[in-house]
Amino acid sequence: MAHANGTIGVQHYAMTIDADGHRIIADEPPSNGGKNAGPSPYDLLLASLCACTAITLRMYADRKEWDMSRLTVELRFSRDAEKLERVDRKLTIEGDLDDAQRARLADIAERTPVTLTLRRGIAIVTTLAPQPDDLDERLDEALEESFPASDPPSVSENS
């Protein structure tokens, strides 16, 4: 399945993300204290939905052998005063397609994998990795427990 990891240092707020071997820079806009060195987290969220929508519809049109010469997916995220969030998605479909085919592509867009994941919600489980000092300490403890016979007898016991 999908995998990504990211690292941020002390610079506000640019960070590098590795998404399955692809390097992405993310940042915040100056209005949020960043330098706009890359897309913001919400831009990346929309980018993943955009990519999934476009790729899924391209695959579907290809499988049906429909003449979809170009597809543009435009997304806008908004949050109202009651903190209700929504994404508005606009499809611009070019090619020799009839109204039924265009409607079918819009219907498929409502059921792309990322669309369904976002609509269902997703459990996010956060854990803490051990601190390097903790890891060394736990390794020392494990070694002491695992190899007690290898410890030499104390010289002071027989003296």
Image (cartoon, helix red, strand yellow):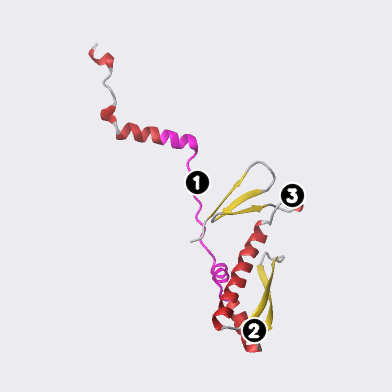
Q: Are marks 1 and 2 in contact (CB under 8 Å)?
A: no
Say which of 103 and 18 sits in front: 18
Say which of 123 and 45 sits in front: 45
Compute the Cα span from label 3 to label 2: 40 Å
Q: Count the marks: how many? A: 3
Mark 1: amino acid: Leu
**Dot 1: few (<14), some (14–19), or many (≥20) neighbours within 10 Å?**
few
Q: Range of the magenta residues?
A: 110-138
**Dot 2: few (<14), some (14–19), or many (≥20) neighbours within 10 Å?**
some
Q: Dot 2 corresponds to which residue?
A: 102
Q: Residue at x 67, y 48 (%)?
A: 14
Which numbered disc, 3 or 2, marks the residue that appears first in the sequence?
A: 3
Which of labels 3 and 2 is toward the front? 2
Q: Dot 3 corresponds to which residue?
A: 35
Compute the Cα span from label 1 to label 2: 47 Å
Which mark is drawn over residue 128? 1
